[in-house]
Amino acid sequence: MPRRTKLVLAIVLVAVAVAAAFVLHLPSAAQLRDWAAGRGAEALLLFLAAYAVVTVAPVPRTVFNLAAGLLFGDVAGIGVSITATALSGMLGFGLARLLGRDLVTRHLHRKSVRTVNDRLADGGVLAVTSLRLIPVVPFAPLSWCCGILSVRGVPYLAGTVLGSLPGTIAVVVLGDALTGGTPPALLACYAGFALVGALGLIKVVRGAAYDSRTNQPATLSPVRDEVVRAEPGQEMRVFSEE
């Protein structure tokens, strides 16, 4: 596919996704429960597919997590939610890599672009996990960013699952599915997750800074190797700076 066509298609898809986030009306958890009543295994598969596809757009995942716990119970709800999260993350990642990677590659000579690319790519699982733990970092746009940057697929998927799992469990178990409210315990969990994520990002940045220092080329001055006769039959090498 020509580069210009990819760029136009990527812009259109992003515009559609953002518009969907504002226009799409998500049902409440109680409405989803009423819809799923009597559908059995079909409800689980349809719910999984809807969750995975809809959240490729920048729409909140919370209502789906709340509904999963209400529909399927805590254990099955967590399993369905994290599976759908992984599928959604990979869909967003794959589409962004297919359509937007060329655009970033053209600008890797810019220091700011290269720095962000290197920090996220070199951070691997820890970087993605840390970002997923921070509640204010939107899920879908982060998937897109990882796709267009040099993040590898396996570390990205592992980081997405690990970083999304604590928040998913907290919402399914602690969230008020019927009212959609946010209990204080859930807010406390969010704060804890954000702190852990921030600490992880600090470690990633510090590790990258350390690597950049240790990988600097040597700048020592040339040395002169002198041979000095100390005693008959012995030689002593003296190194001095020029």
Image: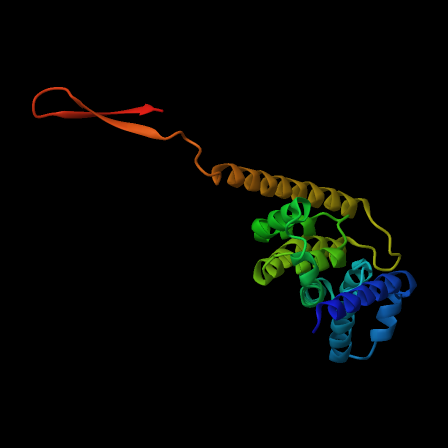
Residue 70, position as x, y percentages in the image: 79, 64
121 above or below 98? above
In the drawing, does residue 49 fall left or right of residue 241?
A: right
Residue 221, position as x, y percentages in the image: 40, 29
In the drawing, does residue 82 fall left or right of residue 211?
A: right
Q: Residue at x 63, y 48 (%)?
A: 114
148 above or below 37? above
In the drawing, does residue 138 fall left or right of residue 27?
A: left
Could you tell me which quadrant the C terminus lies in?
A: top left
Residue 87, position as x, y percentages in the image: 68, 68
Total numbered labels:
0
Could you tell me which quadrant the N terminus lies in?
A: bottom right
Q: Residue at x 30, y 28 (%)?
A: 224
Task: Locate residue 13: give its quadrant.
Answer: bottom right
Work out whether residue 71 can be spotted: no
- State the residue lying farthest toward the top: 230
How has the structure been colored for display? rainbow
Residue 43, position as x, y percentages in the image: 78, 76
189 vs 89, nearest the viewer: 89
154 vs 119, nearest the viewer: 119
Work out whether residue 14 can be spotted: yes
- State the residue lying farthest toward the left: 232
211 vs 70, nearest the viewer: 211
